[in-house]
Image (cartoon, rainbow, N blue to C red):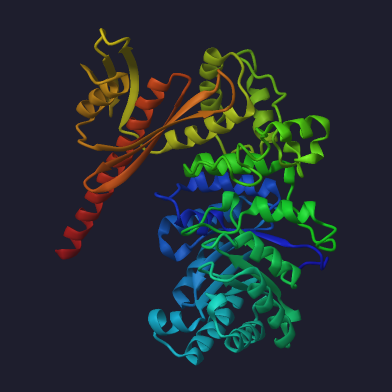
Amino acid sequence: MSVKDKNQVIIFDTTLRDGEQALQQSLSIKQKLQIALVLEQLGVDVIEAGFPISSPGDLESVRAIAKALKTSVCCGLSRAVDKDIDACHEAFKGLDHCRIHTFIATSDIHAKSKLRKSFSDILDMAVHAVKRARNYTDDVEFSCEDAGRTPIDNLCAMVEAAIKAGATTVNIPDTVGYTLPYEWGNIIHTLFNKVPNIDKAIISVHCHNDLGMATANSLTGVLEGARQIECCVNGLGERAGNTSLEEVVMALKLREGYTKGLYTNIISTNIARASQVVSGICNEPVPSHKAIVGSNAFAHSSGIHQDGVLKNKNTYEILTPQSVGFKENNMHMTARSGRHMIKAVLEKLGYKDGTYDLDSIYSRFLKLADRKGQVFDYDLETLMFFSHQEEEETQFTLDNLSVVSGDKNVLPTAAVRLKIGKRTRTDSGTGNGPVDAVFNCITRLTGIKLELFNFVITAKGTGMNAQGQVDVDVVYNNRHYYGKGLSTDVIEASALSLISACNSIYRAQIIEKEKAGLERKESK
């Protein structure tokens, strides 16, 4: 990927790779595709879609994303190992411009303790990996893992060798978030002064947030000459997370004068939506105090602050909510709205025709509109996610639910009817509360003896008509499973979430049986 303007900072988003690694469960192909399309609409230059060698599913998802993207470059990660690089090639075979990103650790502690190789051996592996990747594509990125703790002379030698071998982008990662901004700036500055061929490649920075320095280090890196920032929406990522996309983008936009004209191609008014989509799909709530996208980012509680903002917003607001996309929805969608209206809104949100089942979405929309009266675009976004979830193989489906509850003199009682495969079964019973009564019925009907580990209710949208989303974390056979449910009725949402988790358990059981069958055949 070439950059014509020396002031452009490339945004390389790794939410689907580094971000997903930090999640409690993997995302499905359709979930990843939904996030990728939102990232493309946001204006992300490069989307690291996954690690193809890690599993057939990851390879398939990387390929699906690469086929769907029109403007963003799709990237696959690989170790400096032939089979990893070949897996990236397999994912991108026959497709237009894609990037292979290969890496190897360069610090002494990684070389001695993890790789157990000399720096000379590691240098040779890096050169071989870059050359192999260049056989498949002209867009090759190489990363010096743990660059922040790599002796500077070794780091310079590695960067020079990688560029000579054909790397078009060289990434300098602070893998464990160890460095401070001044220290990190000196590392990037030294590379530009000591590596003779550094002008032949784009220098990138990938900073982790273990000491809370990720955004500061990334900005310091571009001020010293780097022209790519690797980041995640909402700062997701391993341990304490990665550089937050929204933070570096808005810092560069707001402080353009200080950074002497550095800019990105990010459409800032799409930031809020991207944050909400990633948060919802990944089941990772955005902290209220999170910079740029947190619920308190534009809130003022102090009397002095409120007085100042009422007189002049600039007194305490350096950004406006509208600049990152926080604004009221103007599309009035009701039960009278037709399919064309829904399709138009979905297209406005970035969903291409053919990437969703309009009949399924419209059917769910009508049911929601009957309950809520008016449906907003964030409701449709949520329906998209849940319709993808329902397309997966299901054994258990809620057919009917009835609950009786009240004060201390009323015993909470539930009656649940489930479709189980082709059969329908009903159960009723009591509990400590209405949700407990419903859960007791569902566990008896499914026959799955599980333990509820966590239960969270959140409002999807704003106001009294917001839908309730219930997320459950259950334990079955010492393994965690997750389920989501969405409804204007939180009791129904609770039932749907547990049924979703039970379907995940059911699918896992099927996979285990298939594996056992294959193992028996191989043993014969």
Q: Position of residue 520 (x, y in %)?
A: 16, 58
The residue depicted at 75 percent of the width and 68 percent of the height is 223
Q: Which quadrant of the figure has residue 101?
A: bottom right
Query: Along the horizontal axis of the image, is 6 left or right of 464?
Result: right
The residue depicted at 49 percent of the width and 44 percent of the height is 284
Between residues 310 and 201, which one lies in front from this camera angle?
310
Q: Which quadrant of the figure has residue 144?
A: bottom right
Image quarter where the C terminus lies is bottom left
Q: Extreme front residue here?
A: 304
- Kindly tell me whether residue 95 is visible in this rendering: no
Q: Position of residue 356 (x, y in %)?
A: 56, 36
Query: Along the horizontal axis of the image, is 89 left or right of 301?
Result: left
Image quarter where the N terminus lies is bottom right
Image: 101 above or below 152:
above
Q: Extreme left residue here?
A: 524
- Kindly tell me whether residue 396 is visible in this rendering: yes
Between residues 312 and 258, which one lies in front from this camera angle?
312
Image: 58 above or below 343:
below
Between residues 190 and 357, which one lies in front from this camera angle?
190
Q: Position of residue 401 (x, y in %)?
A: 33, 16
The residue depicted at 21 percent of the width and 17 percent of the height is 429
Query: Along the horizontal axis of the image, is 74 left or right of 104?
Result: right
- Tell me how many marks there are: 0
The residue depicted at 56 percent of the width and 77 percent of the height is 147
Q: Position of residue 277 (x, y in %)?
A: 57, 40
